[in-house]
Image: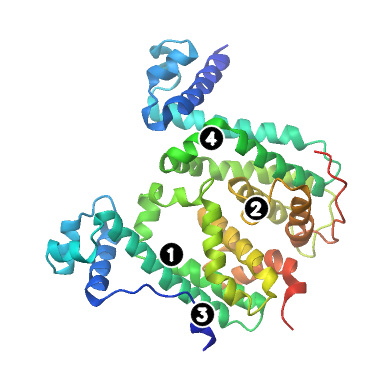
Protein backbone atom coordinates (compact mmCIF):
# COMPACT_ATOMS: atom_id res chain seq x y z
CA UNK A 1 0.00 0.00 0.00
CA UNK A 2 2.69 2.41 1.08
CA UNK A 3 4.62 1.50 -2.05
CA UNK A 4 1.64 2.42 -4.23
CA UNK A 5 1.38 5.86 -2.63
CA UNK A 6 5.11 6.46 -3.03
CA UNK A 7 4.98 5.39 -6.68
CA UNK A 8 1.95 7.58 -7.29
CA UNK A 9 3.70 10.59 -5.77
CA UNK A 10 6.79 10.02 -7.90
CA UNK A 11 4.76 9.64 -11.08
CA UNK A 12 2.77 12.76 -10.28
CA UNK A 13 6.00 14.65 -9.66
CA UNK A 14 7.31 13.73 -13.10
CA UNK A 15 4.04 15.00 -14.61
CA UNK A 16 4.57 18.27 -12.74
CA UNK A 17 8.10 18.55 -14.12
CA UNK A 18 6.60 18.39 -17.58
CA UNK A 19 3.98 21.01 -16.79
CA UNK A 20 5.89 23.49 -14.62
CA UNK A 21 9.55 22.57 -15.09
CA UNK A 22 12.10 21.53 -12.47
CA UNK A 23 12.63 24.94 -10.88
CA UNK A 24 8.94 25.81 -10.50
CA UNK A 25 7.58 22.44 -9.35
CA UNK A 26 6.72 22.54 -5.64
CA UNK A 27 5.88 19.86 -3.07
CA UNK A 28 2.33 21.26 -3.12
CA UNK A 29 2.10 20.73 -6.88
CA UNK A 30 3.21 17.13 -6.48
CA UNK A 31 0.79 16.51 -3.60
CA UNK A 32 -2.13 17.95 -5.56
CA UNK A 33 -1.26 15.97 -8.69
CA UNK A 34 -0.94 12.77 -6.67
CA UNK A 35 -4.19 13.41 -4.80
CA UNK A 36 -2.51 13.31 -1.38
CA UNK A 37 -1.82 15.87 1.34
CA UNK A 38 1.41 17.84 1.68
CA UNK A 39 1.98 16.03 4.97
CA UNK A 40 1.85 12.70 3.16
CA UNK A 41 4.49 13.78 0.67
CA UNK A 42 6.74 14.96 3.51
CA UNK A 43 6.25 11.66 5.28
CA UNK A 44 7.78 9.84 2.29
CA UNK A 45 10.29 12.60 1.48
CA UNK A 46 11.19 14.37 4.74
CA UNK A 47 13.87 16.51 3.09
CA UNK A 48 11.26 18.05 0.84
CA UNK A 49 11.59 19.09 -2.77
CA UNK A 50 15.23 18.13 -3.31
CA UNK A 51 14.68 14.62 -2.06
CA UNK A 52 11.39 14.27 -3.95
CA UNK A 53 12.95 15.54 -7.14
CA UNK A 54 15.94 13.21 -6.97
CA UNK A 55 13.70 10.24 -6.23
CA UNK A 56 11.27 11.10 -9.04
CA UNK A 57 14.02 11.40 -11.63
CA UNK A 58 15.71 8.24 -10.38
CA UNK A 59 12.42 6.36 -10.63
CA UNK A 60 11.80 7.71 -14.13
CA UNK A 61 15.25 6.56 -15.21
CA UNK A 62 14.72 3.10 -13.69
CA UNK A 63 11.34 2.91 -15.40
CA UNK A 64 12.88 3.86 -18.74
CA UNK A 65 15.42 1.05 -18.63
CA UNK A 66 12.94 -1.50 -17.33
CA UNK A 67 10.62 -0.69 -20.23
CA UNK A 68 13.56 -0.88 -22.63
CA UNK A 69 14.66 -4.29 -21.30
CA UNK A 70 11.14 -5.66 -21.73
CA UNK A 71 11.02 -4.38 -25.31
CA UNK A 72 14.28 -6.06 -26.36
CA UNK A 73 14.59 -9.08 -24.11
CA UNK A 74 13.22 -11.69 -26.52
CA UNK A 75 15.85 -10.91 -29.16
CA UNK A 76 17.31 -14.16 -30.53
CA UNK A 77 20.97 -13.11 -30.21
CA UNK A 78 23.21 -10.40 -28.79
CA UNK A 79 23.63 -8.40 -32.00
CA UNK A 80 19.87 -8.22 -32.60
CA UNK A 81 19.31 -7.31 -28.96
CA UNK A 82 21.77 -4.42 -29.20
CA UNK A 83 20.25 -3.18 -32.46
CA UNK A 84 16.79 -3.19 -30.91
CA UNK A 85 18.07 -1.57 -27.71
CA UNK A 86 19.64 1.31 -29.61
CA UNK A 87 16.64 1.88 -31.90
CA UNK A 88 14.01 1.49 -29.19
CA UNK A 89 15.83 3.65 -26.63
CA UNK A 90 16.27 6.35 -29.27
CA UNK A 91 12.55 6.27 -30.01
CA UNK A 92 11.68 6.28 -26.32
CA UNK A 93 13.85 9.33 -25.72
CA UNK A 94 12.40 11.19 -28.71
CA UNK A 95 8.83 10.40 -27.63
CA UNK A 96 9.30 11.20 -23.93
CA UNK A 97 7.49 14.54 -23.71
CA UNK A 98 8.68 15.48 -20.20
CA UNK A 99 12.29 14.54 -20.93
CA UNK A 100 12.31 16.49 -24.19
CA UNK A 101 10.81 19.57 -22.54
CA UNK A 102 13.08 19.59 -19.50
CA UNK A 103 16.19 18.77 -21.59
CA UNK A 104 15.38 21.72 -23.84
CA UNK A 105 14.47 24.32 -21.19
CA UNK A 106 16.41 23.32 -18.07
CA UNK A 107 19.41 21.14 -19.03
CA UNK A 108 21.45 22.75 -16.26
CA UNK A 109 18.99 21.29 -13.74
CA UNK A 110 18.32 17.98 -15.47
CA UNK A 111 21.85 16.88 -16.31
CA UNK A 112 23.31 17.10 -12.77
CA UNK A 113 20.39 14.96 -11.59
CA UNK A 114 21.00 12.39 -14.32
CA UNK A 115 24.70 12.28 -13.55
CA UNK A 116 23.79 11.38 -9.96
CA UNK A 117 21.95 8.27 -11.20
CA UNK A 118 24.56 7.46 -13.84
CA UNK A 119 26.93 5.17 -11.87
CA UNK A 120 24.14 2.92 -10.65
CA UNK A 121 22.49 2.88 -14.05
CA UNK A 122 25.74 1.90 -15.73
CA UNK A 123 26.26 -0.87 -13.19
CA UNK A 124 22.75 -2.22 -13.74
CA UNK A 125 23.13 -2.15 -17.51
CA UNK A 126 26.54 -3.81 -17.19
CA UNK A 127 25.03 -6.60 -15.07
CA UNK A 128 22.28 -7.08 -17.66
CA UNK A 129 24.81 -7.41 -20.49
CA UNK A 130 27.05 -9.69 -18.43
CA UNK A 131 24.13 -12.12 -18.31
CA UNK A 132 23.54 -11.79 -22.04
CA UNK A 133 27.25 -12.42 -22.71
CA UNK A 134 27.23 -15.80 -20.95
CA UNK A 135 28.30 -18.43 -23.47
CA UNK A 136 29.36 -15.85 -26.07
CA UNK A 137 32.90 -16.30 -27.42
CA UNK A 138 34.85 -13.15 -26.57
CA UNK A 139 38.15 -11.86 -27.95
CA UNK A 140 41.27 -13.35 -26.41
CA UNK A 141 41.92 -12.09 -22.91
CA UNK A 142 38.70 -10.08 -22.62
CA UNK A 143 36.61 -10.83 -19.55
CA UNK A 144 32.81 -10.84 -19.48
CA UNK A 145 32.94 -7.92 -17.05
CA UNK A 146 35.09 -5.86 -19.42
CA UNK A 147 32.93 -6.65 -22.44
CA UNK A 148 29.74 -5.86 -20.49
CA UNK A 149 31.22 -2.58 -19.27
CA UNK A 150 32.04 -1.56 -22.86
CA UNK A 151 28.49 -2.30 -24.01
CA UNK A 152 27.02 -0.46 -21.02
CA UNK A 153 29.18 2.63 -21.56
CA UNK A 154 28.58 2.84 -25.29
CA UNK A 155 24.90 1.90 -24.96
CA UNK A 156 24.41 4.81 -22.55
CA UNK A 157 26.36 7.07 -24.86
CA UNK A 158 23.92 6.34 -27.70
CA UNK A 159 20.92 7.03 -25.45
CA UNK A 160 22.12 10.62 -25.15
CA UNK A 161 22.76 11.12 -28.84
CA UNK A 162 23.25 9.30 -32.11
CA UNK A 163 25.99 11.59 -33.40
CA UNK A 164 26.60 10.84 -37.07
CA UNK A 165 24.55 7.64 -36.84
CA UNK A 166 20.93 7.84 -37.97
CA UNK A 167 19.39 5.79 -35.19
CA UNK A 168 16.05 5.69 -37.01
CA UNK A 169 17.66 3.75 -39.87
CA UNK A 170 17.77 -0.02 -39.18
CA UNK A 171 20.57 -0.46 -41.74
CA UNK A 172 22.76 2.17 -40.07
CA UNK A 173 22.12 0.70 -36.62
CA UNK A 174 22.95 -2.79 -37.89
CA UNK A 175 26.26 -1.47 -39.22
CA UNK A 176 26.95 0.35 -35.93
CA UNK A 177 26.32 -2.75 -33.85
CA UNK A 178 27.77 -5.48 -36.09
CA UNK A 179 30.72 -3.70 -37.70
CA UNK A 180 31.87 -1.34 -34.96
CA UNK A 181 30.42 -1.93 -31.52
CA UNK A 182 30.65 -5.75 -31.35
CA UNK A 183 33.84 -6.08 -33.38
CA UNK A 184 35.60 -4.80 -30.26
CA UNK A 185 34.48 -7.69 -28.06
CA UNK A 186 33.49 -10.77 -30.07
CA UNK A 187 35.93 -13.51 -31.09
CA UNK A 188 34.00 -13.91 -34.36
CA UNK A 189 32.17 -11.25 -36.35
CA UNK A 190 28.40 -11.37 -35.78
CA UNK A 191 27.32 -11.64 -39.41
CA UNK A 192 24.66 -9.62 -41.23
CA UNK A 193 21.40 -8.43 -39.70
CA UNK A 194 18.03 -10.09 -40.25
CA UNK A 195 15.71 -8.08 -42.47
CA UNK A 196 14.33 -5.22 -40.33
CA UNK A 197 10.95 -5.94 -38.81
CA UNK A 198 10.62 -3.24 -36.17
CA UNK B 1 54.42 21.83 -41.39
CA UNK B 2 51.70 19.20 -41.13
CA UNK B 3 50.83 19.95 -37.52
CA UNK B 4 50.12 23.63 -38.15
CA UNK B 5 48.11 22.74 -41.22
CA UNK B 6 45.87 20.34 -39.36
CA UNK B 7 45.63 21.90 -35.93
CA UNK B 8 42.71 24.22 -35.18
CA UNK B 9 43.25 27.98 -35.40
CA UNK B 10 43.89 29.74 -32.13
CA UNK B 11 41.60 32.73 -31.56
CA UNK B 12 42.91 36.22 -32.39
CA UNK B 13 43.52 37.98 -29.07
CA UNK B 14 45.64 40.99 -28.22
CA UNK B 15 47.91 41.15 -25.17
CA UNK B 16 45.38 42.99 -23.05
CA UNK B 17 42.69 40.44 -23.81
CA UNK B 18 45.06 37.56 -23.06
CA UNK B 19 45.93 39.13 -19.70
CA UNK B 20 42.28 39.51 -18.85
CA UNK B 21 41.50 35.93 -19.82
CA UNK B 22 44.44 34.70 -17.70
CA UNK B 23 43.07 36.69 -14.77
CA UNK B 24 39.57 35.29 -15.23
CA UNK B 25 40.97 31.76 -15.37
CA UNK B 26 43.01 32.26 -12.19
CA UNK B 27 39.91 33.41 -10.33
CA UNK B 28 37.72 30.61 -11.70
CA UNK B 29 40.32 28.10 -10.54
CA UNK B 30 39.91 29.45 -7.01
CA UNK B 31 36.24 30.43 -6.67
CA UNK B 32 34.44 29.17 -9.75
CA UNK B 33 32.40 31.11 -12.30
CA UNK B 34 29.41 32.13 -10.16
CA UNK B 35 31.54 33.87 -7.53
CA UNK B 36 33.82 35.65 -10.01
CA UNK B 37 32.67 39.15 -10.88
CA UNK B 38 33.92 41.44 -13.63
CA UNK B 39 35.25 43.76 -10.93
CA UNK B 40 37.28 40.86 -9.52
CA UNK B 41 38.68 40.09 -12.97
CA UNK B 42 39.64 43.71 -13.62
CA UNK B 43 41.41 43.88 -10.27
CA UNK B 44 43.27 40.61 -10.88
CA UNK B 45 44.23 41.72 -14.40
CA UNK B 46 45.44 45.09 -13.09
CA UNK B 47 43.23 47.06 -15.44
CA UNK B 48 40.22 49.35 -15.11
CA UNK B 49 36.66 48.08 -15.52
CA UNK B 50 36.38 50.39 -18.53
CA UNK B 51 39.33 48.62 -20.16
CA UNK B 52 37.74 45.28 -19.43
CA UNK B 53 34.42 46.32 -20.98
CA UNK B 54 36.25 47.61 -24.04
CA UNK B 55 38.04 44.27 -24.40
CA UNK B 56 34.89 42.22 -23.79
CA UNK B 57 31.81 44.36 -24.43
CA UNK B 58 29.39 41.47 -23.96
CA UNK B 59 29.97 41.36 -20.21
CA UNK B 60 30.53 38.29 -18.06
CA UNK B 61 28.97 35.90 -20.54
CA UNK B 62 31.20 37.16 -23.36
CA UNK B 63 34.28 37.02 -21.16
CA UNK B 64 33.78 33.46 -19.96
CA UNK B 65 32.82 32.26 -23.44
CA UNK B 66 36.14 33.73 -24.63
CA UNK B 67 38.01 31.93 -21.82
CA UNK B 68 36.37 28.64 -22.79
CA UNK B 69 37.06 29.19 -26.49
CA UNK B 70 40.72 29.96 -25.92
CA UNK B 71 41.34 27.07 -23.53
CA UNK B 72 39.56 24.62 -25.83
CA UNK B 73 41.56 25.84 -28.84
CA UNK B 74 44.84 25.46 -26.95
CA UNK B 75 43.83 22.00 -25.74
CA UNK B 76 42.73 20.97 -29.23
CA UNK B 77 46.10 22.01 -30.66
CA UNK B 78 47.95 19.96 -28.04
CA UNK B 79 45.73 16.92 -28.56
CA UNK B 80 46.15 17.16 -32.35
CA UNK B 81 49.92 17.42 -31.99
CA UNK B 82 49.95 14.40 -29.68
CA UNK B 83 47.95 12.39 -32.21
CA UNK B 84 50.33 13.42 -34.95
CA UNK B 85 53.34 12.22 -32.93
CA UNK B 86 52.18 8.60 -32.78
CA UNK B 87 53.86 5.92 -34.92
CA UNK B 88 50.66 4.08 -35.72
CA UNK B 89 46.93 4.48 -35.19
CA UNK B 90 46.86 2.89 -31.72
CA UNK B 91 49.79 5.02 -30.57
CA UNK B 92 48.27 8.18 -32.02
CA UNK B 93 44.91 7.63 -30.38
CA UNK B 94 46.56 6.70 -27.10
CA UNK B 95 48.66 9.85 -27.00
CA UNK B 96 45.71 12.04 -27.96
CA UNK B 97 43.46 10.59 -25.26
CA UNK B 98 46.13 10.72 -22.56
CA UNK B 99 47.03 14.33 -23.36
CA UNK B 100 43.33 15.27 -23.35
CA UNK B 101 42.74 13.49 -20.03
CA UNK B 102 45.80 15.03 -18.40
CA UNK B 103 44.93 18.52 -19.66
CA UNK B 104 41.51 18.10 -18.14
CA UNK B 105 42.79 16.72 -14.85
CA UNK B 106 45.33 19.53 -14.38
CA UNK B 107 43.36 22.41 -15.77
CA UNK B 108 42.60 25.47 -13.60
CA UNK B 109 38.99 25.32 -14.76
CA UNK B 110 38.78 21.86 -13.14
CA UNK B 111 37.03 23.73 -10.33
CA UNK B 112 34.03 24.22 -12.61
CA UNK B 113 33.77 20.52 -13.42
CA UNK B 114 34.06 19.57 -9.77
CA UNK B 115 31.87 22.25 -8.18
CA UNK B 116 29.70 23.78 -10.90
CA UNK B 117 28.86 20.79 -13.14
CA UNK B 118 25.59 22.44 -14.14
CA UNK B 119 27.66 24.83 -16.29
CA UNK B 120 29.25 22.03 -18.30
CA UNK B 121 26.92 19.02 -18.25
CA UNK B 122 24.25 20.62 -20.50
CA UNK B 123 26.70 20.36 -23.40
CA UNK B 124 26.72 16.57 -22.92
CA UNK B 125 22.94 16.30 -22.85
CA UNK B 126 20.14 15.33 -25.19
CA UNK B 127 19.94 17.47 -28.28
CA UNK B 128 23.27 19.17 -27.54
CA UNK B 129 25.85 16.41 -27.54
CA UNK B 130 25.56 15.90 -31.29
CA UNK B 131 26.83 19.45 -31.82
CA UNK B 132 29.82 18.57 -29.64
CA UNK B 133 30.57 15.50 -31.77
CA UNK B 134 30.35 17.67 -34.89
CA UNK B 135 32.78 20.22 -33.44
CA UNK B 136 35.19 17.45 -32.50
CA UNK B 137 35.00 16.00 -36.02
CA UNK B 138 35.63 19.44 -37.56
CA UNK B 139 38.56 19.98 -35.20
CA UNK B 140 40.25 16.58 -35.24
CA UNK B 141 39.01 15.05 -38.49
CA UNK B 142 41.92 16.43 -40.55
CA UNK B 143 44.69 15.14 -38.30
CA UNK B 144 42.97 11.76 -37.91
CA UNK B 145 42.68 11.56 -41.70
CA UNK B 146 46.49 11.45 -41.81
CA UNK B 147 46.21 7.95 -40.29
CA UNK B 148 42.93 6.49 -41.62
CA UNK B 149 41.18 7.02 -44.90
CA UNK B 150 39.22 10.25 -44.94
CA UNK B 151 35.77 8.70 -45.21
CA UNK B 152 36.33 6.95 -41.87
CA UNK B 153 38.08 9.72 -39.96
CA UNK B 154 34.86 11.34 -38.73
CA UNK B 155 33.53 8.04 -37.37
CA UNK B 156 36.76 7.38 -35.54
CA UNK B 157 36.77 10.85 -33.98
CA UNK B 158 33.23 10.29 -32.75
CA UNK B 159 34.12 6.94 -31.12
CA UNK B 160 37.14 8.50 -29.45
CA UNK B 161 35.00 11.35 -28.09
CA UNK B 162 32.34 8.91 -26.84
CA UNK B 163 35.03 6.93 -25.05
CA UNK B 164 36.64 10.07 -23.63
CA UNK B 165 33.37 11.44 -22.28
CA UNK B 166 32.34 8.08 -20.88
CA UNK B 167 35.58 7.49 -18.97
CA UNK B 168 35.90 11.10 -17.81
CA UNK B 169 32.33 11.25 -16.45
CA UNK B 170 32.33 7.66 -15.17
CA UNK B 171 35.88 6.78 -14.15
CA UNK B 172 37.10 3.22 -13.96
CA UNK B 173 40.34 2.29 -12.17
CA UNK B 174 41.13 -0.30 -14.86
CA UNK B 175 41.07 2.29 -17.61
CA UNK B 176 42.58 5.48 -16.28
CA UNK B 177 42.87 7.77 -19.29
CA UNK B 178 45.77 9.70 -17.75
CA UNK B 179 47.78 6.46 -17.73
CA UNK B 180 49.48 5.65 -21.05
CA UNK B 181 49.57 1.86 -20.67
CA UNK B 182 45.97 1.56 -19.53
CA UNK B 183 44.79 3.88 -22.28
CA UNK B 184 46.75 1.98 -24.91
CA UNK B 185 45.07 -1.21 -23.68
CA UNK B 186 41.66 0.44 -24.01
CA UNK B 187 42.45 1.82 -27.47
CA UNK B 188 43.84 -1.46 -28.81
CA UNK B 189 40.98 -3.56 -27.50
CA UNK B 190 37.96 -1.42 -28.07
CA UNK B 191 38.57 1.30 -30.64
CA UNK B 192 41.16 0.17 -33.19
CA UNK B 193 39.55 -3.16 -34.25
CA UNK B 194 36.72 -1.42 -36.11
CA UNK B 195 39.21 0.70 -38.06
CA UNK B 196 41.99 -1.78 -38.74
CA UNK B 197 40.98 -2.03 -42.40
CA UNK B 198 40.98 1.75 -42.84
CA UNK B 199 44.53 2.57 -41.82
CA UNK B 200 46.70 4.22 -44.51
CA UNK B 201 49.40 1.82 -45.70
Give me the residue at 63% from left, 62% from top.
B159
- Mark 1, residue position: B105
Give me the residue at 56% from left, 31% from top.
A97
Say above or below: A105 vs A134: above
Closer-to-camera residue (B121/A103): A103
Say above or below: B124 vs B86: above
User: Do discs 4 and 3 belong to a common subunit?
Assistant: no
In three-dimensional space, the C-alpha distance between marks 4 and 1, rounded to whole angstroms, equals 31 Å
The first of marks 4 and 2 along the sequence is 4
How is the rendered protein coloured? rainbow
User: Do discs 3 and 2 belong to a common subunit?
Assistant: no
Q: Residue furthest bottom?
A: B1
Within 10 Å of disc 2 (Cα), the crowding (few <14, some 14-19, many 20+) is some
Subunit ID for the residue under disc 2? A
Tell me, for residue B81, which label it has, or none.
Answer: 3
Can residue A197 be seen here? The reply is: yes
State left or right for residue A118 relative to residue A44: right
Disc nearest the viewer among 4 and 3: 4
Total number of numbered discs in the rendering = 4
Give me the residue at 72% from left, 36% from top.
A69
State left or right for residue B36 relative to residue B150: left
Disc 1 to disc 3: CB gap under 8 Å:
no
Closer-to-camera residue (B185/B47): B47
User: Do discs 4 and 1 belong to a common subunit?
Assistant: no
Q: Secondary structure at mark 2?
A: helix
Q: Position of residue B185 (x, y in %)?
A: 65, 69
Q: Position of residue A181 (x, y in %)?
A: 73, 57
Subunit ID for the residue under disc 4? A
- Mark 4, residue position: A99
Amino acid sequence: MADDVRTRILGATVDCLGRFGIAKTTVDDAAKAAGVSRATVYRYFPDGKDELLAAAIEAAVAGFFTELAVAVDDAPDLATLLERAIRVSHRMVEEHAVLQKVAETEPERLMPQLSQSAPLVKEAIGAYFAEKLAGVALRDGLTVAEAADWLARMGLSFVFGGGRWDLDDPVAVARLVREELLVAILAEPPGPAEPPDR
Amino acid sequence: MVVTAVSPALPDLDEQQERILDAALALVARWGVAKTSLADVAREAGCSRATLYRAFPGGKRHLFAAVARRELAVAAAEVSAAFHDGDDLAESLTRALVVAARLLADHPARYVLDHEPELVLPYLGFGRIDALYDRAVATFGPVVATRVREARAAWLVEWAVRVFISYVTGPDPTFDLTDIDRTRSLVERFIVPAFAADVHP
